Image: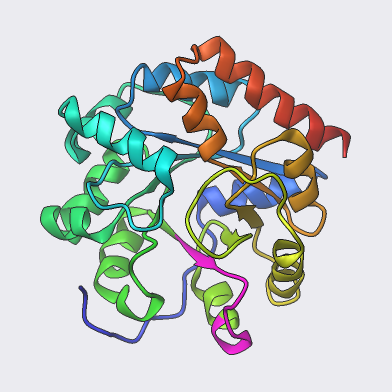
Amino acid sequence: MSPVTALPAPPAPGPMETSLRALRDGGRKLLVPYLTGGLGDWTDHLRAMADAGADVIEIGIPFSDPAMDGPVIQQASEEALRTGVTPGSVLSDLRGVDAGVPLVAMTYYNLVFHMGDERMAGELAEAGVSGVVLPDVPMEEQGPWRAAAEPAGIETVLMAGPITPDDRLARVCEQSRGYIYGVNLMGITGERASLGEQGAVLAKRVKALTDKPVLMGFGVSTPEQAVEVSAESDGAIVGTAVVRRILDGATPADLHAFIASLRAALDAS
């Protein structure tokens, strides 16, 4: 794990944050689906989701011990790893993709450490990736990564949860780039029948502290839930519901229809 270092003041908003701000300020609720890199016809799925109205797409780089991920995304990672998927192969595939929307890699620091901060940041940038989420690296330990990521143009997205204290939440809002990833529920990722009130309370807290885009994820599975979490935030992150469909054999057309249903619900809200 990286040593604890003082983080510098974040630079001006990068291209991804600027794009999301403009969409939000124009009245659009933001939609960010997630898929597992290397799983099946994943680049075709990615293009379909972008075409259906995604504003950013998060790409999970498979890892053998994804502590934050629930059973569905863990299964997706395991299946991808069994076919020989590596961080290098995911990024190589992305070099041939022009999705037309910003892409954010989501993975664990073991993979970054193995490759090296500077090399990982450089290869992400070369593959057209705009941002990164590293859920297992505390903000205070991101100094070396951020020192490599910022010059490469990679925006590091930070997460905030329902029990994040107010003083820490303020620092997360200051240091996060691209957007704030709000976690609706404590625990691991996965579909939920209902989301409760924690997410709405957190979204209000974050919005009171920052003008950066605030997106809410964990448990969002249906168009109705996407609208629900977007009521107090700037939009929704939808992961497990997408990955489950891919594991069940969804075609790019199927994924397009699902994302389009989320987009239509948000646009009508």
Tell me if 150 is positioned left or right of 189 in this view: left
The residue positioned 49% from the left and 11% from the top of the image is 251
Relative depth, front residue between 81 and 206: 81
Could one spot residue 59 in this view of the protein?
Answer: no
Image position, residue 109 (x, y; %): 25, 60
The residue positioned 30% from the left and 37% from the top of the image is 77
Could one spot residue 139 in this view of the protein?
Answer: yes
Image position, residue 62 (x, y; %): 28, 41
- Residue 191, compared with residue 5, is above or below; it is above
Image position, residue 263 (x, y; %): 73, 30
Query: Which of the image's four quarters has the N terminus?
Result: bottom left
Relative depth, front residue between 193 and 3: 193
Image position, residue 167 (x, y; %): 59, 89
Figure quadrant of residue 197:
bottom right
Specify whether residue 257 is painted magenta.
no
- Residue 13, compared with residue 144, is above or below; it is above
Tell me if 188 is positioned left or right of 186 in this view: left
- Give the number of callouts: 0
Specify whether residue 162 is painted magenta.
yes
Query: Which of the image's four quarters has the C terminus?
Result: top right
Q: How is the image coloured?
A: rainbow
The residue positioned 74% from the left and 59% from the top of the image is 196
- Residue 58, compared with residue 90, is above or below; it is below
- Residue segment shown in magenta: 157-168
- Residue 255, compared with residue 109, is above or below; it is above
